[in-house]
Image (spheres, rainbow, N blue to C red):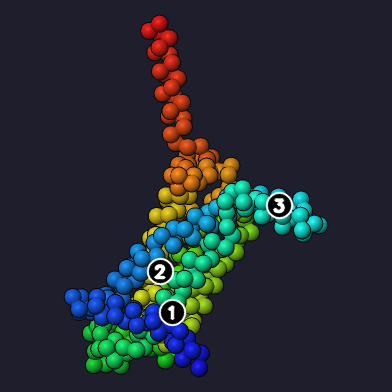
């Protein structure tokens, strides 16, 4: 019943995605690779929304220390706390809900792939991708663990290897490429979610025998998401290390994001001093010395 209700209001999205998959599949002639390309195209389409979401989270994390100070100062006066919090949001032009709606817009697209696969299950049953449907499973019973095939015979059947890869990509995404924590407690929660989320997803995929085509799309989408997230971290946050999920974002540790240029360049030490500042200052000092000598 729930699946039918979901399919009814998702029908327009499902139809568009189905047409897109079939259109991509004409020159590719492989539904597996068509799903990978579709995931990349959807990620590119939602790039502006994801960038806006990232900047919204970044803005909230920058004022997190001030929010905590307000909560401590007005802990006994809820009305005053609300007023001061809204004033803080207004001063820094931060919207606490701006980071949520981009994900809500994309969520129906993500789950619609399930119905795309189910509507074309016959086609996916005759398609393979990399090891899926390979010689390992041709003409023989596919090895399985408690009823779940380790290697799928087609994209319409579950594949344990692909489920494990998807779960592992979720771990990497949450643990290393998510927004950096603002305090040790949040960092600890982030580390716990990095383990709980992949385990839960892996268990559900194994228990409900998700078609490998659907898992392949989600795995590809997650891989492209990590790529974009890493790019945004390097551009707007510039963590201390190549992968740094626990570096605290504060106004003291990093320059605030400018509305004009999008971000200020942080120094390698993470102290928030722009790279161009010291260089310009040094050039200015040398220029003054030369002028004095010439005089």
Q: CA distance from mark 3 to mark 1?
A: 39 Å
Locate residue 246: give its quadrant: bottom right
User: Circle 3 sits in a helix, a strand or a loop, which is it?
Assistant: helix
Label 2: how many Cα within 10 Å (few below 14, some 14–19, many 20+): many
Mark 3 vs mark 1: give the one in front: 3
Please tell me which residue is depicted at 57% across the width and 57% down the height of the picture. 95
Position of the C terminus by quadrant: top left
Q: Tell me: 254 left or right of 134.
A: right
Q: Is residue 131 above or below residue 275?
A: below
Label 3: how many Cα within 10 Å (few below 14, some 14–19, many 20+): some
Label 1: how many Cα within 10 Å (few below 14, some 14–19, many 20+): some
Seen as rendered, the residue at the extreme top is 295
Is residue 213 in view from this perspective? no
Where does residue 20 sit, x and y in percent of width and height?
A: 29, 77
Observer-nearest of 29 and 142: 29
Observer-nearest of 217 and 165: 217
User: Can you identify the residue that label 1 sits on?
Assistant: 111
Mark 3 vs mark 2: give the one in front: 3
Q: Are marks 3 and 2 in contact (CB under 8 Å)?
A: no
User: Can you identify the residue that label 2 sits on?
Assistant: 222
Where does residue 269 sit, x and y in percent of width and height?
A: 50, 40
Please tell me which residue is depicted at 39% across the width and 65% down the height of the picture. 46
Locate residue 22: give its quadrant: bottom left
Observer-nearest of 267 and 292: 292
Q: CA distance from mark 2 to mark 1?
A: 13 Å
User: Circle 1 sits in a helix, a strand or a loop, which is it?
Assistant: helix
Which label is found at residue 84? 3
């Amino acid at each position: 019943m729930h699946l039918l209700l979901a399919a009814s209001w998702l029908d327009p999205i499902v139809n568009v995605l189905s047409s897109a998959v079939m259109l991509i599949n004409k020159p590719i002639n492989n539904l597996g690779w068509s799903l990978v390309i579709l995931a990349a195209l959807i990620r590119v389409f939602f790039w502006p929304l994801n960038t806006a979401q990232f900047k919204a989270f970044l803005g909230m994390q920058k004022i997190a220390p001030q929010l905590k100070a307000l909560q401590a100062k007005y802990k006994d006066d809820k009305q005053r706390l609300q007023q001061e919090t809204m004033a803080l949001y207004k001063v820094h032009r931060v919207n606490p809900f701006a980071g949520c709606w981009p994900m809500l817009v994309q969520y129906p697209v993500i789950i619609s792939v399930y119905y795309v696969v189910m509507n074309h299950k016959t086609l996916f049953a005759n398609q393979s991708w990399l090891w899926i449907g390979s010689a390992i499973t041709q003409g023989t019973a596919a090895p399985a663990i408690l009823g779940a095939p380790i290697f799928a015979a087609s994209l319409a059947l579950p594949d344990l290897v692909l489920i494990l890869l998807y779960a592992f990509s979720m771990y990497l995404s949450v643990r290393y490429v998510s927004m950096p924590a603002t305090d040790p407690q949040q960092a600890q929660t982030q580390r716990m979610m990095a383990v709980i989320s992949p385990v839960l997803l892996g268990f559900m995929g194994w228990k409900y025998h998700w078609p490998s085509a659907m898992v392949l799309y989600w795995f590809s989408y997650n891989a492209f998401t990590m790529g974009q997230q890493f790019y945004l971290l390097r551009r707007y946050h510039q963590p201390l290390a190549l992968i740094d999920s626990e570096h605290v974002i504060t106004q003291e540790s990093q320059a605030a994001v400018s509305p004009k240029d999008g971000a200020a360049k942080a120094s390698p030490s993470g102290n928030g001093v722009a790279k161009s500042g010291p260089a310009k200052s040094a050039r200015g000092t040398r220029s003054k010395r030369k002028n004095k000598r010439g005089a």
